Image (cartoon, rainbow, N blue to C red):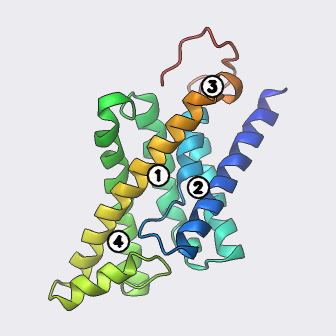
Amino acid sequence: MKKKTKMQMVIVMGIVFNVMGAFIAMTLSIPFYMDSIGTILVAGLLGPKYAMLTGVLGSITSGITFDMYSFYYAPVQLFTGFFAGLLYHGKWLKGWRTPIGSLLVGIPTSLLSACITAGLFNGITSGASSTFVVVFHHLGLPLVFSILLVQVFTDYLDKFFAVCLTKAIIERGHLYEKWGIAWKDTATLKTSTKEKSFF
């Protein structure tokens, strides 16, 4: 199979994971988002550039199909894809570093999400986490602080869950050997299971 075809299939798979995860979270009112599983999966297999593309396309697809708020959070997916790609391939999402790496992915995305949520929607979106924003605000906390507090907590849980899930999928399914591209040198495909993996 040609390298370009493999890359396209991985990106499509990532978009599907993002849309399915977001739909499940929204339908079941889960207090985190599950819309970056595919972004982080692609970050691990193809690197940050393609992860960013996957995230934006996933947000657009979700926005068209069932959640108009997703359109506005496409920039968050750019941050997620960029930082997840760098940290995945920098060993910060492996072993004991995984919780720290997940936090490093979650902090910039939560800051951007909080700005979008406060600036455009006054704290209320389609996510179940909006309930906690309302509760904290009614307890006397400033709205912006309430949004930031909720975003940091839920983004961390979301990214940690997504990282653990995608690592399990990649490692147990040997996906890097089958589908991975050396993102610093995209002309090279690692197709042999005997080659060293960075996971």
What residue is pinned by disc 2? 55
Asked if the residues shown at circle 2 and circle 3 are in contact, with their CB atoms under 8 angstroms apart, the answer is: no
Where residue 13 appears, as percent x and y from the top left, is 71, 47
- Of callouts 3 and 4, which one flags the residue occurring earlier in the amino acid sequence? 4
Q: Residues within 10 Å of mark 2 (few under 14, many from 20)?
A: many
Give the CA distance from mark 2 to mark 3: 23 Å
Q: Amino acid at mark 2?
A: Gly
Earlier residue among tags 1 and 3:
1
Q: Which is in the foreground here, disc 1 or disc 3?
A: 3
Q: Look at mark 4 in the image and give the residue it sits on.
A: 114
Question: In the image, what residue type sits under mark 1?
Answer: Thr
Instruction: List the residue tagged with mark 3.
Output: 174
Q: Which residue is mark 1?
A: 80
Q: Where does residue 119 sit, x and y in percent of width and height? A: 38, 81
Q: Are marks 3 and 4 in contact (CB under 8 Å)?
A: no
Q: Amino acid at mark 3?
A: His
Q: CA distance from mark 2 to mark 1?
A: 8 Å
Q: What SS does tag 1 mark?
A: helix
Relative to 112, residue 124 above or below: below
SS under mark 4:
helix
Residue 52 in picture, x, y percent from top left: 57, 50
Task: Say if 85 sits above or below 18 in the image.
Answer: above
Camera-near label (2 vs 3) is: 3
Compare marks 4 and 2 and give the one earlier in the sequence.
2
Residue 101 visible from this viewpoint: yes
Q: Do the CB atoms of the residues marked 2 and 1 lie less than 8 Å apart?
A: yes
Give the Cα distance between marks 4 and 1: 14 Å
Task: Residue lying at the far top in this picture: please name it.
Answer: 194
Q: Residues within 10 Å of mark 4 (few under 14, many from 20)?
A: many
| Residue type pointed to by label 4 | Ala
